[in-house]
Image: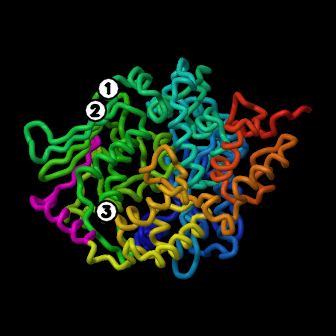
Amino acid sequence: MMDNALICNKIKQMLSRGEGQSLEFKECGRGISKTAYETVCAFLNTKGGSLLFGVNDSAAIVGIAKDAVEGIKQDFVNTVNNEEKLSPTFCLSVEEVEIDGKILLHIYVPESSQVHRCNGRIFMRNNSGDFDITDKHAEVSNLYLRKQSSYSENNIFPAVTIEDLSHGVIEKARNIAAINNSGVDWAEMSDIDFLKHTGLYQKNLLNGEEGFTLAAVLLFGKDEFINMAVPAFKIDMIKRVENTERYDDRLDLRTNLIDAYEKAMEFVSKHLPDPFYMEQTERINLRENIFREVITNMIIHKEYLGAQPTRFVIERDRIFTENSNKPYINGIINLSNVVAHPKNPNIAKMFRIIGRAEELGSGVRKLYKLCKIYTNSDPKIFDENVLFRFELPIKANFFANAAAQEHEASTPHDTHHDTPHDEDSYGIRENMILSFCKTPRSRDEIQKYVKIKDKSYFRVYILLPLVNEKKLLRTMKNKPKSKYQKYITNPSSTPHDTPHDTPHDGEKEILSFCKIPRSRREIQEHLKIKDRVYLREYVIQPLIKAGELLTTIPDKPKSKYQKYVIKGYKK
């Protein structure tokens, strides 16, 4: 997230410009103006833009009533994910800002690679107005043609089937999206519903062709189908510090973008230092924050039909990336001309849904701020004819200094916590953690809760023992090192303290309740279990695997119409 000063400065700059092609003000004192969604649709169809709620047409801040803020935010998120209102739907985030004691809401809407309708009508943005072009057939046709020709990620592959995509990767993305709780019931969707909802299955209204898009294949395709669809695709990760003629290490990635991102970040963690840095009272992981943004940009700004492979290279005096490009600025990107314009909006949208990309436009500002701290150099970002390039100069002693700083920060004499042998303190802390993790918590959340500063100590002596003893369960069992991993208390570890029934009692309760078919929501409400992931992974699924509980739609386990019933049920 951007810090508050940057956010306020950005908003004040918008107010000074006034409404225009890419900016719209809405008062929305206690509710959202009906025309706000027409503006969202127009921005999506045109060149994107920003909405400011709590500002009148004269650019004066009127603010939003404090008791109405959360309701407005929830209404907005729900509506842009409602196909009856906005089709296709689009996931947008709402940024809350306070200026001079008044609350404003900022929504950035990127240009979409699809054509959107609001209440069945197509809107375009022109100057400061939203215009309905639905009945202007020439303009609608031109809009579809522009979207298809501008965004290769929209290329449709009619022969690709759901079996050609990786169910495991789709499920992982869907589960992460559910944990992020972005206002959509992702976990209950089938694979095909999830892909349709995120714009990865489309129909070309000009020729009737429909199917999975190139974006779907790149994000979730099995490796062999990615290679067939985009033969030139690869991400080349290289370290060339000692052996400057060849390389010290190399990783050739030719897999789906979800897994490729994780493996690229592992390469970064392996070869780049993570110096100790505090911002006020909180430690900031400079390496992760910087290169999460860099790797994400490599992925969402690439022209995938280009022949140039994506490269990430670590050298003695610089770190740089380059990939095929369709330029938008055609020159150097800096803080004065940065424009939030993803070259692959649907790929970018998926990365935001699963929490791997932030609000578009904030990344460049973050890079300039954190790179200066990390290497004492400003990054250089080039949006040019053939290549999109990022370059970060580094000093000759960068690796040695950063390693020494990282070592100093992690030495035992600098930590202020109990030793592993302090059994009384450990027992109290264990109970605190198990109580805190009644709902899924990240490693960082748990560590802050028990006020332990040293991450390595916490992981080795506190967290992992609880996981190994099965007192804590991972929410992503197949990806123990995922940055999106969370931990939840095993109900059998604290039978008198957890909000859930123990497995034995829960089993009896659910089997008694499901003598007739029940939906997931009905079961969850009956058992009074707040966490949906917990219910699915640790209550429903074990009973299904044991054959005690059956699904009413076995061929579509993720169907939103799915219900559960005990074995032997007869209508």
Residue bearing mark 2: 309
* x 36%, y 52%: residue: 292
What amino acid is at disc 3? Leu
Is the C-beta separation of discs 2 and 1 under 8 Å? yes
Front-most of residues 561 and 473: 473
Q: Tell me the crowding category of disc 1: few under 14, some 14 to 19, or many 20 or more residues within 10 angstroms, Cα based.
A: some
Q: CA distance from mark 2 to mark 3?
A: 27 Å
Magenta-colored stretch includes residue 308: no
Kindly state the secondary structure of the residue where label 3 is placed.
helix
What amino acid is at disc 2? Pro
Using residue 254 as the reference point, say whether residue 535 is left or right of it. right
Q: CA distance from mark 2 to mark 1?
A: 7 Å
Using residue 133 as the reference point, say whether residue 562 is left or right of it. right
Inspect this view and state whether residue 146 appears: no
- Residues shaded magenta: 384-411
Kindly state the secondary structure of the residue where label 1 is placed.
loop
Q: Tell me the crowding category of disc 2: few under 14, some 14 to 19, or many 20 or more residues within 10 angstroms, Cα based.
A: some
* Rendered location of residue 257, percent (x, y): 42, 38
Kindly identify which numbered label has been placed on residue 232.
1
Nearer-N-terminus badge (1/3): 1
Q: CA distance from mark 1 to mark 3?
A: 32 Å
Nearer-N-terminus badge (2/3): 3
* x 9%, y 42%: residue: 243
Residue bearing mark 3: 286
* x 32%, y 34%: residue: 253
Extreme-right residue of the structure: 571
Using residue 42 as the reference point, say whether residue 460 is left or right of it. left
Q: Is residue 142 above or below residue 560?
A: above
* Rendered location of residue 178, percent (x, y): 60, 50
What amino acid is at disc 1? Ala
